[in-house]
Amino acid sequence: MRVKRVDELLSRLVEILDYKRLNYQSKLEEYAKKTEIEKILSKYPKHPFKGLIELETEELNALLNYFVGEYDSQDIETKKYWMLESEVNESLKETKRYKQASALFTKLGDKLQEYLETLKGISYQPQETTHLLDLTVSLINHLKNDQIIYDISKYYDVLTPSQILVEEDIYGFLVAISLNNLKLLKAGKNAIDPKINMTKEIREYLMSILTEQIKQLEKDKEKNTMVNEKLVNLSCLIDKISNNYDSLIDLYPTEIEQILSEVWDDNYVSEQIDNLTIPLAVIKGKKQGLKMEFNDDELSTIEQFISLLKEEEIKESEREIKDKQKCEEKITKKIEMLTTTLHKIDGTVTDYFDLDDFNTIVDLLILKKQYYEYIKNVICVLNATNLKINNHQDEVKEDTMVIDLTELYEEEQREKQQKLTKVKNLLEQFNINYQAFPNKLLNKLATVTSYEHLNEMLAYIDNHLELTFVKKYADGIIKTSLDKKINDIKCSQLYYLLVYSTPKIMDNLIMTAKENNLALTDIFAVPRVFASQNDDGTYEYFMDNLKFIKQEYPEVLAKLVSHSPAVLGVNSELFRHNVEATQLYNMSIISDHKNAFPSPRALATSDFEYVIDRYIEAGEYDYVERFRSQLETNYMVALRFKYLQLKGIDIKESDFDTTSEFKDDMQPYLKDLSIENIPVAINEKEIKWLDSINEEKDSQKQKVQYLLKGIYISRPKVLKYYSTLLINKYDDKNQALFYSLVKDSYLTKEEFNTLHDLIYNRKDM
């Protein structure tokens, strides 16, 4: 959240509030109109016209103009007369005048009934709407009349997220109101004590997150090692060719062009490479065994080229120094600002919370994923604190507190440094290159786990020859940014193993690998397998899944572990469920003659069945069968577009939602929805009827998909929903079957109606 122009935010807020005000007023008017019409029509239930005729002409005219069209008041008087006279003189009902009047009142009565029908099911809460309207008007008046708002929480009900406003927009409005209050306060507006105090819990929490952020920035400042990759590459190039002119031929042209294009424009790069043509020819001749050497001109060309590179190296070095300096200045400024905010919170500095303070605190709360109500209340508290401040500074108290905080921070830093040194020494003792570890991981090694545990794990690895490869995780040679990323990943794997695993887990994994002829390097590529679920790991799941695959599909075990060991670390119940689901969809996790081995990651997704259903209903079952690996990616949007394209439907006109067509709440009847329920539905006469009208001719595909009037529907989906509705005693079988067919399907309104007619117009079975 970034609040910048307070006046612009408040102006936008007033516009939104004006819109809300009109909306609330419209709702109240609608409610009043509905109530009045119901009263008119209920006055004479058997003769509703009487209620209309008895209305004053002005009221009747308003109803006619609103519901029927413009009518002349004099004409209305005439028609009322004929209606009233016909009540006492029956013969008048045969006259043309009466019939005209009767037609008008009939039309108005029908329109009123239609209007009331459209409002059925709409909940009217006039008291709540009136309350919201009053709050909205009050807030608008305060903002337009430059009045201080003492308790912002009073207006929470009208400052709410919506389709156009996210939660951060609301925070912005609340902060803008607070800063406007501050502006009014400084301009001399009188303020009363809002009787809202910052609780101890809020104060301590805000201090903790501010202190944490300051410490993090201090670390960033300390390790400000911005890497200028252009400079690194340029320096490497200079070193290579300065020490050995002949190495030019090894770098020409690709590497030289790539490095030079980072510092020079294309034309200048081409010019410099062209200048090297003759020296390069000499080098090439020497490589082929010819007796050739550089003459003075050729040496001069190379030296001049190196000289240009060195000039550019100096420029890049100067840029790097400036960039680092700018970065450091930026961090320093941020630390100073955060420290000021911290002292305002802890009371060391008695000053108003300004724009920077509000932005800082709200941003940190969002970063910490604090809930919506909490952040709103913090803004309200800061606003109230501003209204209490007398703006007298206590300089002595501030200086003392700064010293205390500084000493405390320095002591913490010393302790952390001592722990870090011990960890580095320990890694070195076991021949592990600690310098390869990113600083963040080294610091975590020193704080997240105990020194004793770290020592135990390192000793275990050192005593097992089969784990020698683990030590090499920290032996990466870093030349490029890609090398660094790979190194960091390997170090993070080693970190996870050292911190969260145990010798017992390691023993079991080594033994399992030997028994099943699996490569330890494959298993160790998944760090979470090293740890128990208690430490947010997947060790227990891994062992359960491995046992299941070994028992049911032993022929794929090695391939599964080799290609995607991570899949065996997912929830074992989910994994087993998905493997069994492949059979329901006429598949298998075993490679068939089409070599259609399913993507292991697909077996780890919670929406495995849902994805297959969508492919089937987009007419793409053949595609899934040939390329099962696609199931790992939920391309729902792409599939929907493909379906619309297949049907020749304009995407802009494809907003039909099948779920909105069901007024009954089906959700309570879908308790324990699962493919395990399917046997209940298989022998139901409705399902047998559906199977009998399936237009799909392929006997294998008939098990998986329905083709009904040219519409593809997933058969397992229908069976799953229909059986679950039956189990939960949903009475209307037609509705249950229809719902099961269209649930989550890509359908147009016409296709929806086609399936509806198919179900509800079928002959008795």
Image (cartoon, grey):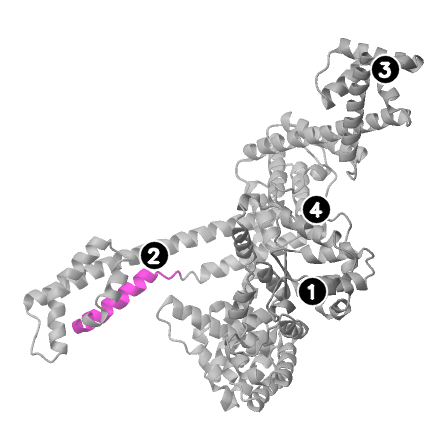
Of the image marks 3 and 4, the number of the one nearer the N terminus: 3
| Residue 392 visible in the displayed image | no
Give the residue pinned by disc 1.
Answer: 691
Give the residue type at disc 2. Answer: Ile
Q: Which residues are magenta?
A: 226-248
Of the image marks 1 and 2, the number of the one nearer the N terminus: 2
Which is in the foreground here, disc 3 or disc 2?
3
- Mark 1 near mark 4, Cβ–Cβ under 8 Å? no
Give the residue type at disc 1. Answer: Asp
Give the residue pinned by disc 3.
Answer: 94
Give the residue pinned by disc 2.
Answer: 321
Quadrant housing residue 40: top right
Judged from the image, the secondary structure of the residue bearing numbered disc 2 is: helix
Of the image marks 1 and 4, the number of the one nearer the N terminus: 4
| Residue 721 visible in the displayed image | yes
Which is in the foreground here, disc 3 or disc 4?
3
Structural distance between the alpha carbons of marks 3 and 1: 62 Å
Structural distance between the alpha carbons of marks 3 and 4: 81 Å
Judged from the image, the secondary structure of the residue bearing numbered disc 1 is: helix
